[in-house]
Image (tube, rainbow, N blue to C red):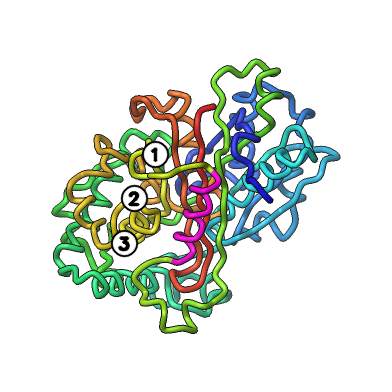
Amino acid sequence: MASGIKDKVAIIGMGCSRFGERWDAGTDTLLADAFDEALADAGIERSQIDAAWTGSCFDRINVGNSAIPAATALRLDGIPVSRLENMCATGTEALRGAAYAVASGAVDIALAVGSEKLKDTGYGGLPVQTKGTFNDLWLPMVSAPAGFAQLAAGYRARHHIAKDDLKRAMAHVSWKSHQNGVHSPKAHLRKAIAMESILNAPMIADPLGLFDCCGVSDGAAAAIVTTPEIARALGKRDLVTIKAVQLSISSGIESTTSQWDGSYVRNTRTAAAKAYTEAGIKDPRTELGLIEVHDCFSITELVTMEDLNLSEPGRAVHDILDGFYDRDGRVPCQIDGGLKCFGHPIGASGLRMAYEVYSQLLGRAGERQLPGVSLGLTHNLGGVPYLGVAAVSVLGLH
């Protein structure tokens, strides 16, 4: 019977570019920024990498449909390099590919890298009349804000939450992330926002206001993985190992059955349950030291707290308002500001989240550093709540 990859793979190096409207840099430069940092962190030579997985979702202007541009940018000569895409879980999918290759014994050292220059694609993000040139050409579906606004409606109806209470909790989600993002030098947005500004912001898709939505950014992140034994031989003392990495893809059942009421995300619950089993986590609310979740919208983070079994059904609103997920709360969420402050360059986000957890576990997070962190989780959610993909990874000290 399959036993998973818990503690079979160690992360020995990670890197992350600065996120933002990077008109100053091409995809190759962003990839190189992340890779060079990861390579220096790992303390190895480029020639020691046996295989690589590169993730990119929409950036076909710069990346195309193959791995060749990434291999060229990073000078990965003569090794297998695979390009992949899995919506907003693309970065985590790259990490999964590299980790599985190491765990299987197929390679000794593998690279996972994810990048995206959304600003170059014309991706609009918000539901303006044209939605940006890219959306009209490729996405014959509701806008992302509209899709997740429906999640808010479903959640309210299921748990009988007053609209004002939900709005205050959503505002607290955004307020908390902006407070944290001030201390993230690589974040796109580094400005604290007053609660009144969030509550009174222009409406995008009721109940989502402007500050309930993450931005559109460019960026890249990378991870180098190997076995714990090789990591020790390389002189690594404090090891961060992968405790679990799980994905769940929708079969479309949410939109074809009356069994789903639109109040939660089935894929997140499925991936989380499998990840907890693989990692040996019994009570995530007391065992996890920090989490990085897919806060494309504030309502998404709120609902995710219940989908990850951190808050009881219908109680996320209260936990959020009580500060349970604040910097000084029991399970800090988005200690670096999350998607809300970094934006969401799709291929990079999953690895960027892992970069923050990795930095916290090793005590390298600077002003953001939390005390005594030994176990962290990342979560991605792609597509829309009723048709998409979810990924959950758990990283910890070994």
| Dots 3, 2 in contact, CB < 8 A | no
Q: Is residue 350 visible?
A: yes
Q: What numbered label is drawn on residue 299?
A: 3
> In screen coordinates, is 165 left or right of 377?
left
Q: What numbered label is drawn on residue 310?
A: 2
Query: Which residue is more in the foreground, 28 or 311?
Result: 311
Q: Earlier in the sequence, mark 3 or mark 2?
A: 3
Determine which residue is flagged by label 1: 288
Mark 2 lies on a secondary structure that is loop
**For the residues marked 1 and 3, what is the alpha-carbon distance in whole angstroms?**
21 Å
To which quarter of the image does residue 241 belong?
top right
First to last magenta residue range: 266-278
To which quarter of the image does residue 216 belong?
bottom left
Residue 315 position within the rendered picture, expressed as x and y whole percent measured from the top left = 23, 57
> In screen coordinates, is 176 left or right of 125?
left
Query: Which residue is more in the foreground, 388 or 25?
Result: 388
Mark 1 lies on a secondary structure that is loop
Residue 12 position within the rendered picture, expressed as x and y whole percent measured from the top left = 62, 28
Amino acid type assigned to the residue bearing label 3 in the image: Ile
Amino acid type assigned to the residue bearing label 1 in the image: Leu
Numbered marks: total: 3
Query: Which residue is more in the foreground, 253 or 202?
Result: 253
Q: Give the residue drawn at x 34%, y 70%.
A: 263
